[in-house]
Image (cartoon, helix red, strand yellow):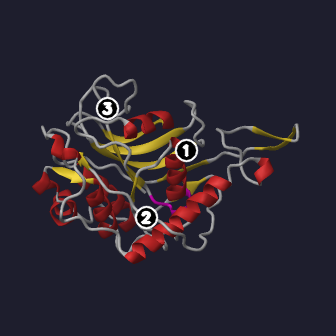
Amino acid sequence: MGSHRAGRRVRVGTVAWSLLAAIAWSGSAVAPIARADDQIGSSALNVHGADFVPLTKEELRIVALKEEAARREAASLKGAGGGGVAPATCPLTVVNGGTPATACPPYWGYLSTTPRQQQKSYYCGPTAVQVVSNYVWGVVDKYTQQYISTTWTNTDNDGQTYVWRVRYGLNAASAGHLPANFVYAEYQPPSPSDWHNKLRTDVGTYAMPQVVGVAPHDVGATRWLYSWPTPHTTGHYIVLTGWNGVWDGTESPTVNYDDGSGGYGGSTGAFSDPATTIWYTITKSNPYHAADWIIW
């Protein structure tokens, strides 16, 4: 777990694993998340533009350390036979050799962030950066949403916020206050368990939130965020701040998140939904949402 700094408070119900040696890691091409109210054509889902800023060699080295920490986290969930915690919502009895071996302790983590109201309908990206920046700096609005937009995320110019620009803004706005061996990187998780593993690593090991792109309540969707009660075809960013129960494909594990969309189709505040719902909205694609992207 990263050292605690002013304004970064974490409650965790598990062990934060130590980081090991760096391993090879390569990033994927990035796609944009369109703003909530804009009618954008197919270009909204194009790969990054000419101004794309990739992770540096040093940042890639740090991401490799994070990947190793995530593997350690995943390895801890192999049950009693693997010397870890059972991968299910607690309480749970672990069976080893046909006899009860141990009881699964509460397994959860939560960060004390403060939701912020987005100031424009297409400012969900800058707002997510602002929430994380406020958290690490321990102050209210170290940077305004407009400053974040014009300096790092380019939201006002593009009318949308590319995934890589959210990553860029998160690292820049939190520079000097990130935990040791932590940097934000864009990523497309291949499975829900992999995404949840990255969330547990962010919160439990580094005491840092995760930002994800979602289709919060797509028209015709079978699941949607509690913070978005009305259907609205859009792309959106939310800040994930905690979890309760490890991903097992059921409705029991939940994920905490901050939303700032009040007045623009959703609600502003701190919310909690089933992890299955969060994953559904991450992977639900529409013309204004490039699916499957997280910034962890």
- 220 horizontally vs 191: left or right: left
The residue closer to the viewer here, 139 or 74, is 74
Label 3 amino acid? Trp
Q: Identify the magenta region.
A: 204-208
- Could you say which quadrant of the image residue 113 lies in? bottom left
Residue 60 % position (x, y): 42, 71
- Could you say which quadrant of the image residue 272 lies in? top left
Rendered image: mark on residue 26 = 2
Most common SS among magenta residues: helix
Name the element at disc 2.
Answer: loop
Q: Badge 1 is on which residue?
A: 193
Name the element at disc 3.
Answer: loop
| Nearest to viewer (mark 2 / mark 1) | 2
Q: Badge 3 is on which residue?
A: 228
Image quadrant where one finds the N terminus: bottom right
Mark 3 and 1 residues: CB-CB less than 8 Å, in contact? Answer: no
Crowding at dot 1, Cα within 10 Å, few <14 / some 14-19 / many 20+, comes out as some
- Could you say which quadrant of the image residue 87 lies in? top right
Name the element at disc 1.
Answer: helix
Q: Residue at 16% across / 58% down in the picture? A: 146
Q: Earlier in the sequence, mark 2 or mark 1?
A: 2
